[in-house]
Amino acid sequence: MTPEDGSSKHRSLSDVMKQFLLGIAFGLVLMLIPLSYISLSAIEWQLLHGVALAALVISCGILAAIGGNKALSPLMKFLESIPPIS
């Protein structure tokens, strides 16, 4: 019996890169949510804050590239649910 979820199908490098970039986009949106509620001038930025935010964005990209469409479908639904800025 073969699995029907397509896990045995090999993905091309361009598919993995697209999924990585979509994960990066999700990580950036996730990072901007708390920053939209806080004045940037009120934050005392430290190196640890920048490293933590960069790690969040990169880890979202890596998880999306590893998880493939299973990981990206909820992320895409979330990004589509955000209302456009008018």
Image (tube, rainbow, N blue to C red):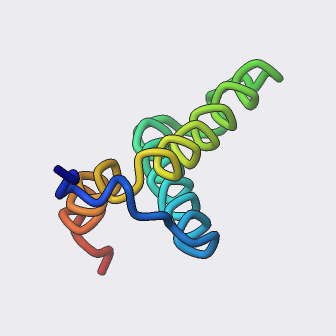
The total number of labels drawn is: 0
In percent of the image, x 34 and y 56: which residue is there? 72
- In the image, residue 10 above or below residue 61: below
User: Residue 26 placed where, x, y %?
Assistant: 44, 53
Q: Nearer the viewer, residue 83 or 73?
A: 73
In percent of the image, x 56 and y 58: which residue is there? 20
User: Residue 80 placed where, x, y %?
Assistant: 24, 68
- In the image, residue 10 above or below residue 56: below
In percent of the image, x 46 and y 49: which residue is there? 64
Q: On the picture, is 43 further left or further right than 82?
A: right
Residue extending farthest to the right is: 47
Q: Nearer the viewer, residue 47 or 67?
A: 67
User: Residue 78 placed where, x, y %?
Assistant: 24, 56
Q: Nearer the viewer, residue 18 or 57?
A: 18
Corner quadrant of residue 69: bottom left
Q: On the picture, is 33 further left or further right than 84?
A: right
Corner quadrant of residue 16: bottom right
User: Residue 21 placed where, x, y %?
Assistant: 57, 63
Residue extending farthest to the front is: 1
Q: On the picture, is 81 further left or further right than 37?
A: left
- In the image, residue 4 above or below residue 66: below
Quadrant where the C terminus is found in the figure: bottom left
